[in-house]
Image (cartoon, helix red, strand yellow):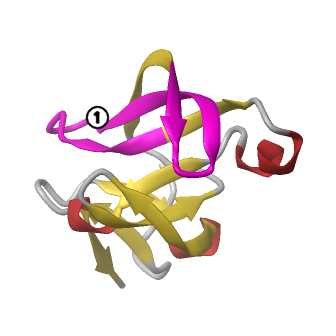
Amino acid sequence: MEDFAHRPLYSCRNCQNPIALRSDLLSKSFHGKSGPAYLFSHAMNIIVGQKEDRKLMTGLFTVADIYCSNCGEILGWKYVRAFEARQKFKEGRFVIETAKMAKEY
């Protein structure tokens, strides 16, 4: 198990389970179902749900909701496939709603 004691990270607001490292944060300008959200290159301690095609603000994507592996809280989604070429950079990346996470040091 990695030592997260000295690395800034984000955790599940509900149960404090670490879910993403600050160094994996790509953008703070995303929007989730409940408001502001961040885009991460990697997420940890999550469960990836069923894939589905979803029309989002920037186009059609195949996405899968992501859940905290500890408490089951829905955190956001993973981009599985982008149908438009200019959105391909999102594939394999994670959107986590700011309302669902807490920042820790």
What stretch of residues is rendered in magenta? 53-77
Number of numbered discs on residues? 1
Front residue of 82 and 60? 60
Q: What is the crowding at mark 1: few (fewer than 14 residues within 10 Å), some, or many (at least 20)?
A: some
Q: Which residue is pictured at 29% across the width and 65% down the height?
A: 35
Rendered location of residue 71, percent (x, y): 14, 38
Q: Which residue is pictured at 31% across the width and 68% down the height?
A: 98
Q: Secondary structure at mark 1?
A: loop
Q: Is residue 46 above or below residue 86?
A: above
Dominant SS of magenta comes to strand
Question: Residue 48 appears in which quarter of the rendering?
Answer: top left
Image position of 38 (left or right of 19): right
Rendered location of residue 99, percent (x, y): 22, 66
Front residue of 41 and 39? 39
35 drawn magenta? no
Rendered location of residue 69, percent (x, y): 28, 34
Q: Quadrant of the C terminus?
A: bottom left
Q: Is residue 46 above or below residue 51?
A: below
